[in-house]
Image (spheres, rainbow, N blue to C red):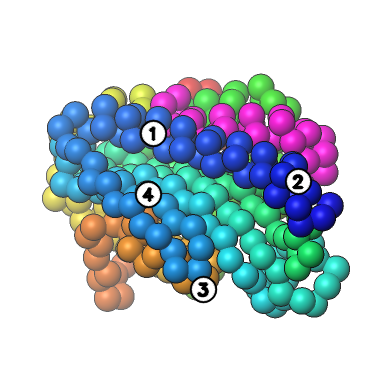
Amino acid sequence: MSASGAAEGGLSSRRARAASWITELHDQATALFTELDGGGAFREDCWLRPGGGGGVTRILAEGHTFEKAGVNRSAVDGVLPAAAVQRLGGRMDTDEECRFFATGLSIVAHPRNPRVPTVHLNVRYFELIDQSGELRDTWFGGGTDLTPTYPSPDDARAFHHTLRSICDRHHSSLYPRFKAWCDDYFRNTHRGGEARGVGGVFFDHVRPLEDASRLDDSALFDFVGDIGKSLRQTYAPIVSQRRDSPTTDAERSLQLTRRARYAEFNLLHDRGTLFGLQTGARVESVLMSLPPLAQWTYSADESADPLSAALTAMLVPRDWAAEDD
């Protein structure tokens, strides 16, 4: 495909579809969290990236239900060195730099009540274009996962049951594969491989007709779009059930400790955070996932606390969707 053909043909139509899709999901997520919070309002911050593109960050702070919730979308483009392409896992048969385009939605919510789990969701679309303007590689990535700060196995089971049903509508191979990928990815390897939460699904570099599901381009858009709007089904019922639960100071302390683990993962291991910081993305938006408050207690014996021990036991990966509600 020539440079002019890329501009006039499939390349522009794919970008247009992806950008429109992300904008729609962004607005839906904003409406959902406004509804769930029941009192707070989002602050909107539009920004431009000097290297190309920009985004819209929406933050709800000090709300009724959420201490902090961030809903961010971006569409950025620029130049990547060959080494960066290799780190990303892109397919380019040249050692030259190339152009990239990436658009995505990121959601993170940190509730006030320790009995309401933290949730994360991300969906994204990525392109690599060579120096002649030819589209050389495209893929989808994303996922959603739950991070409890209070031991509630029922919530983990409900989250996974619903998530599996969403995935199964597209292909039965998706949930087990992406669930295992999530369990493997969200680990604090510097803390002996401790899981960040109870998982969910995670996927990256999923290309049309290549995954075991053999989904074509349109079907992949549909699947990733369903993940992008899944929180109304997977997370909203948990929030509605738990947000007004009585809580204790000990539960708040454990919540702040688990938030610290969450922050450690995002700053040390998360690919999206590292990619954003390495490509000159807006720092405020990249770091929106961090909790507003967290605590690190030196040399704490977490096994001595029954509440913490019960939560730690939940973090061992298991087949939540196979368990009865």
SS class, disc 1: helix
Quadrant for residue 123, please give it. Answer: top right
**Residue extent of the magenta highlight:** 206-235
- Reading the image, the residue beneath label 1 is 27
- Of residue 248 and residue 280, the one placed in the foreground of this image is 280
Cα–Cα gap, marks 1 and 3 = 28 Å
Number of residue marks = 4
Residue 182 lies left or right of residue 35; in this view the side is right
Q: Are marks 2 and 1 in contact (CB under 8 Å)?
A: no
- Label annotation for residue 56: 4
Residue drawn 75% across the image and 68% down it: 131
Residue drawn 14% across the image and 50% down it: 249
Residue drawn 36% across the image and 57% down it: 47
> Image height check: is 105 above or below 192?
above
SS class, disc 2: loop
Q: Position of residue 264 (x, y in %)?
A: 40, 67
- Reading the image, the residue beneath label 3 is 278
Dot placed on the residue nearer the N-terminal end, 2 or 1: 1
